[in-house]
Amino acid sequence: MAIFQVSAKLGSSLLFEPVTNHPFLTFLLPFFAYGFILTVYRLFFSPLSAVPGPKLAAVTRLWILYHDYQDQRTDIVIDLHRKYGPVVRLAPNEVSFTSTTAVKDIYTGSGRESGFPKGKEIVAGLLARNLTRILLVE
């Protein structure tokens, strides 16, 4: 009986053994599954999935934070606007516009009138402090 167990263990591999035999993999599997599902959602099913931009921007915010850290964000955003047009996705929940009419359409009027729901910061009049803009002069 001991010979059978040894030969069975020699013939098995990590890929074919049940995940429950590996507690570490059992622990990591939900995290990988969540990351995969979140990535697929952000790339294909998010309301912002139709906004052009780098695919990495749709998945994670880390790449733009890296460029912030390197003080290259302005140059990167300008290059992205030249490549993709006046509307560019910078992160999973961040979009950049070059048009001043876009700012007016988004930040004026009530949420129902403009089609864009407003946050409490905008309604409270804190827009001037929170709104940033990059001016492209050619």
Image: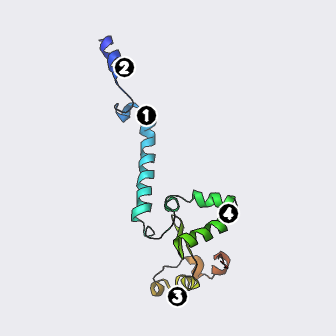
Q: Which residue is mark 2?
A: 10
Residue appearing at x 68%, y 77% in the figure: 129
State the SS at label 4: loop
Precedes in sequence: disc 2 or disc 1: 2
The foreground one among 30 and 52 is: 52
Look at the numbered disc 3 and give the secondary structure of its residue: loop
Residue 45 coordinates in the image, percent (x, y): 39, 64
Label 4 and label 3: CA atoms lie apart by 34 Å
SS of the residue under disc 2: helix
Mark closer to the chain start, 3 or 1: 1
Structural distance between the alpha carbons of marks 1 and 4:
43 Å
Mark 2 and mark 1: span between their CA atoms?
20 Å
Q: Mark 1 falls on what kind of element?
A: helix
**For marks 3 and 2 on the same chain, the one whose residue lies earlier in the sequence:** 2
For the residues bearing labels 3 and 1, Cβ distance under 8 angstroms: no
Identify the residue shown where x is 49% and y is 60%.
55
Instruction: Point out the frontmost of discs 1 and 4.
Output: 4
Task: Give coordinates of residue 53: x percent, y percent.
Answer: 51, 66
Q: Nearer the viewer, mark 2 or mark 1?
A: 2
Residue under the image location 57 percent in, 68 percent down? 80
Label 1 neighbour load within 10 Å: few <14, some 14-19, many 20+: few
Amino acid tagged 3? Gly
Q: Please name the residue that numbered disc 3 is placed on.
A: 109
Q: Position of residue 23 (x, y in %)?
A: 43, 34
Q: Is residue 44 above or below residue 32?
A: below
Whole-percent x, y for residue 19 in the image: 37, 35
Q: Which mark is residue 23?
A: 1
Q: Amino acid at mark 1?
A: Pro
